[in-house]
Image (cartoon, rainbow, N blue to C red):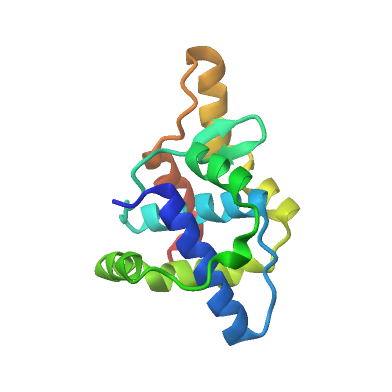
């Protein structure tokens, strides 16, 4: 399984490649990165592909991967990521995840941070469910089964 930071780095790197191929700009900042990471993981889970080691957490501000949040706060200049790790690519190819990731990045990349935030915090979303549970139990982990179920509405065609 992949560390969330490695997956985030792959998404940033792949987004740059897709920007060049499609002549667009995705303008991915810290919050947008967390949203894209969350949505991509949800789409993959909907297809039965569980590749990220840790669970995303429901914070008041939205779904957050704490390790990625910390990494982003220390490395906000994403332009330094010039190439995707071959090891990560091979891992993702093994699970046939790259076409799903590409499709997600192409669909999400041009969306604004606000649009993605609204979607990830939608009514009956896994984030909302986990946040409500956390007020009662103190556990703010977003259940991967809830993500798979929720994103199966959007990811499968």
Q: On the picture, is 115 further left or further right than 11?
A: right
Q: Using the rendered image of the protein, determine whether residue 152 is visible from the camera's viewpoint.
A: no
Task: From the viewer's perspective, tell me whether residue 40 is left or right of residue 121.
Answer: left
Q: Is residue 50 left or right of residue 134?
A: left
Q: Residue at x 45, y 67 (%)?
A: 101
Tell me which residue sits at (65%, 50%) in the image: 30
Q: Nearer the viewer, residue 79 or 40?
A: 79
Residue plotted at (52% across, 53% down): 37
Q: Residue furthest top?
A: 136
How far from the left and from the top, in percent, is residue 146?
42, 39
Picture mark count? 0
Picture coordinates of residue 82, whole percent (x, y): 52, 72
Q: Quadrant of the C terminus?
A: bottom left
Residue under the image location 34 percent in, 64 percent down: 88
Q: Quadrant of residue 54?
A: top left
Q: Nearer the viewer, residue 50 or 18?
A: 18
């Amino acid at each position: 399984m992949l560390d969330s930071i490695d997956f985030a780095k792959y998404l940033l790197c792949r987004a740059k490649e897709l920007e060049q191929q499609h002549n667009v700009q995705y303008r991915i900042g810290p919050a947008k990165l967390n949203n894209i990471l969350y949505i991509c993981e949800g789409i993959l889970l909907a297809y039965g592909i569980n590749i990220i080691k840790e669970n995303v957490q429901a914070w008041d501000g939205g779904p957050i991967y704490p390790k990625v949040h910390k990494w982003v706060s220390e490395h906000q200049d994403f332009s330094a990521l010039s190439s995707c790790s071959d090891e990560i690519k091979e891992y993702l190819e093994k699970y046939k995840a790259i076409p799903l990731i590409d499709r997600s990045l192409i669909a999400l990349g041009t969306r604004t941070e606000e649009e993605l935030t609204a979607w990830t915090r939608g009514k009956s979303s896994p984030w909302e469910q986990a946040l409500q549970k956390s007020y009662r139990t103190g556990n703010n982990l977003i259940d991967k089964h809830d993500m798979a179920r929720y994103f199966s509405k959007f990811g499968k065609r």
